[in-house]
């Protein structure tokens, strides 16, 4: 496809709405409804499962099945303990960062609706500057403005309520998308855009395409583990985020060198099927799509691992979107990278033939 801008006003509006909606791990369904509503004109049917994974299917009767996948959940907190004087202590739901919590607003999700709160922190004047205690999981707390535990409970807040940050979508310096939960609702957005482009360009694929938005990745790839057993795909191309390693306090000797604005990141790892990865690289080079490389060692830490080792082995690969400030409320990606991940997945799909095994022995 020609090197023109992929994203339009409608798709950006969808991205903003999708990101701003809270979809913490285990509570993804409202976000999935937004995603499915956007995807509906571009697919033939949907598959959903018990825990909320959603799949838009093109050519559902085809025997050969290709998955393109992202995950829909975001990190969050659970209410773990309510003190007698009405303060809340929390535990993680996913990899929530305790160090960014102090002074952040939160939304506590209850049956009565959203209850607002703040992560409190002692004023600088009251702390021992010679022996500063940093934020830790056991000392951060939420204040909902209640005077005691009974008042907290009257608000509808109880142990087990899930807590999210309200930070919303912004565009920084014209071409940087900033929000919480870009990890990895950007993935769901990008695969939806691939489906839109296939529809708008009237592409007839020779295989079934399963546009998969999995749940519960943040707590161990659980949604992907479940849905791959339902789909039983032949090929899986997963998209997630990876670190921009050019910001301060990151050691490139340990983390490698990847950065926003330089293109999609293609991973090397045992779970990544080599022939499929090389097909993606060949496609990028042929279509002049910029890309970067990343070595992931024993595992990728993404849904790629769940797909690769399922159903007796599925040819799987990972295309990542470089991102700054992962698991914070200001996750940042470059618009060009978003467009080039979409472009690379789209062009790779056009370069896959039904029935390919990607076998090393053919």
Image (cartoon, grey):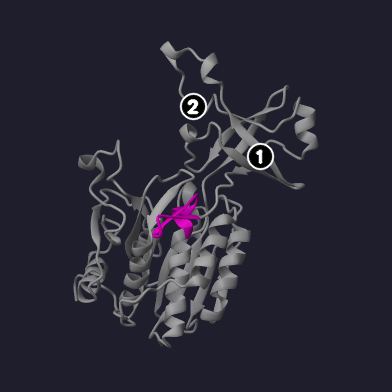
Please tell me how crowded label 1 is: few (under 14), some (14-19), or many (20+) other residues with Cα within 10 Å.
Answer: some
Magenta-tinted stretch: 170-185
Residue 284: quadrant of the picture: bottom left
Residue at the disc numbered 2: 136
Please tell me how crowded label 2 is: few (under 14), some (14-19), or many (20+) other residues with Cα within 10 Å.
Answer: few
Q: Residue at x 51, y 29 (%)?
A: 137
Residue 356: quadrant of the picture: bottom left
Real-space Cα distance between discs 2 and 1? 20 Å
Q: Position of residue 354 (x, y in %)?
A: 34, 82
In the displayed structure image, the side of residue 43 where residue 325 appears, left or right: left
Q: Residue at x 41, y 76 (%)?
A: 65
Tell me which label, 2 or 1, sits earlier in the chain. Answer: 2
In the displayed structure image, the side of residue 362 where residue 267 appears, left or right: right
Residue at the disc numbered 1: 160
Callout 1: SS = loop
In the displayed structure image, the side of residue 285 where residue 99 appears, left or right: right
Vertical placement of 360 versus 293: above or below? Answer: below
Q: Position of residue 98 (x, y in %)?
A: 49, 33
Query: Is residue 25 one of those drawn in magenta?
Result: no
């Amino acid at each position: 496809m020609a090197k023109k801008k992929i994203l339009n006003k409608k798709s950006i509006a969808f991205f903003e709405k999708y990101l701003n909606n809270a979809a913490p791990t285990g509570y993804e369904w409202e976000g999935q409804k937004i995603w499915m509503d956007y995807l509906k004109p571009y697919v033939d049917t949907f598959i959903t499962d018990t825990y909320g994974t959603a799949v838009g299917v093109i050519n559902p009767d085809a025997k050969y099945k290709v998955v393109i996948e992202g995950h829909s959940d975001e990190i969050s907190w659970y209410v773990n303990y309510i003190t007698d004087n009405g303060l809340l202590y929390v535990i993680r739901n996913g990899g929530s960062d305790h160090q960014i919590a102090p002074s952040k607003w939160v939304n506590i999700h209850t049956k009565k609706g959203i209850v607002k709160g703040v992560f409190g922190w002692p004023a600088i004047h009251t702390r021992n500057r010679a022996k500063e205690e940093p934020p830790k999981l056991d000392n951060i707390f939420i204040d909902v403005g209640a005077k005691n535990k009974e008042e907290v409970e009257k608000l509808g807040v109880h142990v087990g309520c899930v807590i999210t940050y309200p930070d919303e979508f912004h565009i920084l310096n014209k071409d940087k998308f900033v929000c919480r939960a870009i990890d990895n609702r950007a993935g769901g957005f990008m695969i939806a855009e691939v489906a839109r482009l296939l529809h708008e360009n009237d592409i007839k694929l020779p295989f079934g395409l399963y546009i998969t938005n999995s749940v519960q990745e943040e707590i161990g790839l659980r949604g992907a583990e479940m849905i791959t057993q339902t789909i039983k795909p032949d090929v899986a191309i997963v998209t997630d985020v990876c670190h921009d390693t050019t910001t301060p306090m990151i050691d490139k000797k340990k983390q490698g060198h990847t950065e926003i604005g330089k293109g999609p990141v293609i991973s090397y790892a045992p779970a990544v099927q080599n022939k499929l990865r090389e097909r993606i690289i060949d496609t990028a080079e042929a279509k002049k799509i910029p890309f970067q490389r990343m070595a992931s060692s024993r595992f990728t830490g993404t849904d790629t691992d769940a797909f690769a080792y399922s159903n007796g082995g599925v040819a799987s690969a990972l295309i990542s979107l470089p991102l700054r400030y992962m698991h914070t409320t200001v996750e940042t990606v470059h618009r060009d990278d978003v467009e080039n991940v979409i472009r690379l997945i789209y062009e790779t799909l056009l370069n896959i033939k039904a029935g390919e095994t990607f076998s090393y022995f053919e």
